[in-house]
């Protein structure tokens, strides 16, 4: 089972994304604060993070940079959620540690499908090692 951390301010966004992922047999942890997310990540065991940039406490972009430097086990795959207006500016946001981004408003089913694909790859990698 793939463990997913959702760090987003919006309760509606967290709920919609979590519902899509639960149907895909993911274990979900959901938070509203970057500092709380950082603590969960530091404890280890998160496979995929879905992060909004504008979190209270540690921002999502700062959190991405921290993940990049922290040598977490496993190293989580990071999806940054960015507003459509920021999509042209996302290259700098992706560099400090995010693997990819989705423009908001996010289609939870599309994001769920992407995470399902990633989960299949995680399963294959774990079988190989």
Image (cartoon, rainbow, N blue to C red):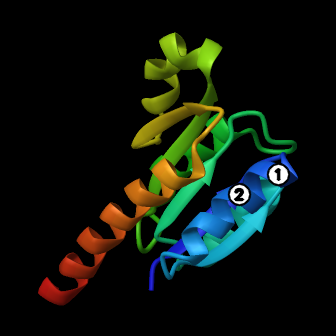
Image quadrant occupied by the N terminus: bottom left
User: Which residue is label 1 attached to?
Assistant: 12
- The x, y position of residue 114, in whole percent, is 39, 54
User: Which residue is label 2 attached to?
Assistant: 16
Furthest residue toward left? 128
Question: Considering the numbered disc 1 on the image, is that residue within a helix, a strand or a loop?
Answer: helix
Q: CA distance from mark 2 to mark 1?
A: 6 Å
Taking depth in this image into account, of 2 and 91 the one nearest to the observer is 2
Q: Residue at x 68, y 41 (%)?
A: 52
**Please, is residue 35 above or below residue 54 in the view?**
below
- The x, y position of residue 128, in whole percent, is 12, 84
Image quarter for residue 120?
A: bottom left
**Please, is residue 107 above or below residue 122 in the view?**
above
Image quadrant occupied by the C terminus: bottom left
Q: Residues within 10 Å of mark 1 (few under 14, many from 20)?
A: few
- The x, y position of residue 12, in whole percent, is 82, 51
Image quarter for residue 74?
A: bottom left
Question: Considering the numbered disc 2 on the image, is that residue within a helix, a strand or a loop?
Answer: helix
Look at the numbered discs 2 and 1 and tell me whether their residues touch, using CB distance below 8 Å.
yes
């Amino acid at each position: 089972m793939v463990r997913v951390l959702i760090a987003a301010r919006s309760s509606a966004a967290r709920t919609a994304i979590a519902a899509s992922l639960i149907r895909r047999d993911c274990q979900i942890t959901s938070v509203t604060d970057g500092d709380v997310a950082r603590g969960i990540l530091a404890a280890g065991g998160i496979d995929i993070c879905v992060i909004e940039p504008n979190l209270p406490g540690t921002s999502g972009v700062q959190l991405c940079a921290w993940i990049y430097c922290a040598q977490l086990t496993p190293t989580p795959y990071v999806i940054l959620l960015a507003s459509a207006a920021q999509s042209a500016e996302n290259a700098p946001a992706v560099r400090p540690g995010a693997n990819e981004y989705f423009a908001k408003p996010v289609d939870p089913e599309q994001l769920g499908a992407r995470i399902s694909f990633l989960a299949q790859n995680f399963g294959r990698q774990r079988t190989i090692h």
